Image (tube, grey):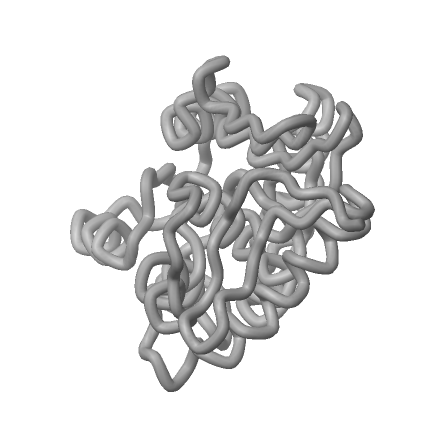
Amino acid sequence: MYRVLLVDDDPHIQAANEAFLKRQGYQIYLAENGPEALDIAATAALNAVVLDFDMPGMDGVTVCRRLREVSQIPVIFLSAYAQTEDRIRGLMAGGDDYLGKPYSLVELELRLRLRIQRHHQISTGDILRFGELEIDLGLREVRYQGVPAVFTTLEFDLLAFLAKNPGQVFSYEQLHNEVWRAPINQGLHNIQVCMARVRQKLERLCPGIHYIETVRRKGYRFCSPQKQD
């Protein structure tokens, strides 16, 4: 089930999009403004965002730029204006696609699904396995003995990056540069807090097994499962 955030200040558009996408099997989150959308994106493990271009206060372009500081998930813009300069602004802000209003719900779902699948390149080869721990890069899901756990977008990105480079030690600064991609003074503390949450969730998911090791004064590394004595 793909998790999609719909961001629009028009309740009628939100209701129509939500009802249609839920019938197609999507799990939907709703936000009516930019700050609310960013709050949800920081806590939910999303697969994509459908974003209104023209919102009062924080517009869609600003929201997209902020999202791109922490995630590369697909963003599809919706706009009542089909002007070329608006499309360019949206794409330059990091948007992946653009639909002009009014639009077909069928087309919206198709574009959404294709963007998600292209982003994740879903295949059996996209699952990292370490003992009974599975990190599914396609579904963006972490499972232990088949039981899934919920990781936010940034938490998953941190864990996946370490797991793709097992045995290598990465400092906070390196993790920040590789995953967070925001100015260092805006993101370093958040990386530290996020890493602590990742380790706590792994401890709850895999009791007594330590996949992330602290290397004193150097950083962290992902290692083979070790049972605690």
Extreme front residue here?
229
Residue 139 appears in the rendering:
no
Q: Quadrant of the N terminus?
A: top right
- Of 142 and 11, nearer the camera is 142
In the rendered image, residue 16, in percent from the top left (x then y), is placed at 66, 35
In the rendered image, residue 44, in percent from the top left (x then y), is placed at 66, 52
Q: In screen coordinates, is 131 left or right of 206?
A: left
- Quadrant for residue 198, please give it: bottom right
- Of 217 and 204, nearer the camera is 217
Residue 70 appears in the rendering:
yes
In the rendered image, residue 222, in percent from the top left (x then y), is placed at 50, 48
Q: From this view, report whether residue 153 is shown above or below residue 20.
A: below
Extreme top residue here?
124
For the point 39% across and 68% down, the residue is 171
For the point 76% across and 24% down, the residue is 146
- Quadrant for residue 38, please give it: bottom right
Q: In screen coordinates, is 154 left or right of 197?
A: left
- Of 64 and 153, nearer the camera is 153
- Quadrant for residue 206, please give it: top right
For the point 63% across and 37% down, the residue is 3
Q: From this view, report whether residue 77 is shown above or below residue 177.
A: above
In the rendered image, residue 58, in percent from the top left (x then y), is placed at 47, 73
For the point 51% across and 28% down, the residue is 128
Q: How many marks?
A: 0
